[in-house]
Image: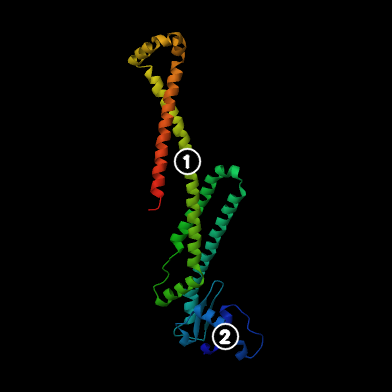
Amino acid sequence: GFREMFGYWVKLLNVDKPCGYKPWHETNCATAFEKRWAADRTYRRWEHYDCYYGFNSFSAAMLSSPCEDPPTWQHWFEMYFDQMLLLLYVRVNLFKFSEGLTDVSAKMLAVGEGSKATAIEQWQNDFRKLRLAFTCFENLYQFPLLSNQQQAIEMYGLMRERMDIDDLYKEISTEITSSDELLEAEVEKQRNDYAAILNWVAAIGLGLSVALSCYQIQSFLEWWKGVLSWPPLMKWAPFLAESAPLWWCLLWVGFSLVSIGVMKGRKKRHQATEQEPR
C-alpha cells in the first residue's frame, strides 16, 4: 500500500523528481524533515483506501489506487480541486492587493516634501479605492460556504492553512487599513490647519463688524462726542474724529484674536491633561 511508499508521496506533493532509475526502495526514501513536512500537508481520512490528498502554497496533489467505491478520483476533480482553484484565486488576488499597496507607497516616497501636501488627497483616494476593492473581495471570497460535506469542510480548512490564506489576508488587511487611516489623519490635520486660518479671519471680521456696528448706535455717538470734548483731547479732536473708526476696529479685532487664542490654549491644555497616563 501507499503507506509503505510515503517517500513517493513526499516527492509528488513537493513536485520533486524521483532519483532517476534507481530501485523503488531507494527512490521511496525521504528524510525525517520531509516526512514531517508532508504529514502536515496531507489529508489522510481515506488512507486505508490508499488515497492521499495534499496541499501546499505551490501545489496540490492526489495519489490513489484504483477505487470505485468511493470514487475518490471523481471527488477530487469535481469537488476538492475546485476548492483548491478558488483558494488559488484568493491567494493570487491577495498578492495583487499587496502589489497595489507597493505601487501607491512607491509614489508617496517619490514625491518631495514640498509637493507632499498637495499629493496627500490623491494618495488617500488611491488607498480608498484599494480599500473598497478589498472590502468587496473580502465579502465575496473570504469565507464562502462551498459544501456541507464533512470531508470537504475539513479539506477546505487544511487548504486555507497550508496555502497561507489567512496569514496573507490579515497582513494585507492590516496594511490597507493602517495606510488609509494614516492618510485620513494627515488630511484631517490639513483641514484643521485651514479651519484655524478661517477662525482667525472670522475673528477679524467679527471684530470689524462689532466695531462698525457701534457707529449705528446713537448713544455711542453721543458718548464719543463727549469724549472728544474732554479738554485734554480738544487739540486732537479732528484727528481722533477721522481715525476713530480705525482705532475702534483695531481694538475689537485685537480683543477677538486674544479671546480665540485663550480658548484654543485652554482646549489644548485640556486635551493634554486627558492624554496623560493615570
At mark 2, the secondary structure is: helix
User: Which dot marks residue 17?
Assistant: none
Can residue 119 be seen here? The reply is yes
Question: Which residue is nearer to you in this view: 223 or 25?
Answer: 223
Question: Which residue is nearer to you in this view: 272 or 29?
Answer: 272
Task: Say which amino acid is labelled 1.
Answer: Arg
For label 2, count other residues whose C-alpha is less than 10 Å away and answer few (under 14), some (14-19) or many (20+). many
Q: What residue sits right under mark 2 in the picture?
A: 7
Can residue 205 be seen here? The reply is no
Q: What residue sits right under mark 1 in the picture?
A: 191
Q: Identify the residue at image location x=46%, y=40%.
A: 192
Q: Residue furthest front?
A: 232
In which image quadrant can residue 70 be found?
Answer: bottom left
Task: Say which amino acid is labelled 2.
Answer: Gly
Horizontal and vertical percent position of residue 208: 43, 23
Horizontal and vertical percent position of residue 68: 47, 85
For label 1, count other residues whose C-alpha is less than 10 Å away and answer few (under 14), some (14-19) or many (20+). few
Horizontal and vertical percent position of residue 1: 52, 90
Q: Identify the residue at image location x=47%, y=55%.
A: 177
In this rendering, the answer to whether 198 lies above or below 219 is below
In this rendering, the answer to whether 102 lies above or below 225 is below
Horizontal and vertical percent position of residue 43: 47, 79
In which image quadrant can residue 35 be found?
Answer: bottom right
Q: If you read the primary sequence from the N terminus, does the residue marked by circle 1 or circle 2 appear first?
A: 2
In this rendering, the answer to whether 16 lies above or below 187 is below
Distance between the alpha carbons at the discs numbered 1 and 2: 65 Å
Question: Which residue is nearer to you in this view: 15 or 246?
Answer: 246
Q: Identify the residue at image location x=46%, y=87%.
A: 48
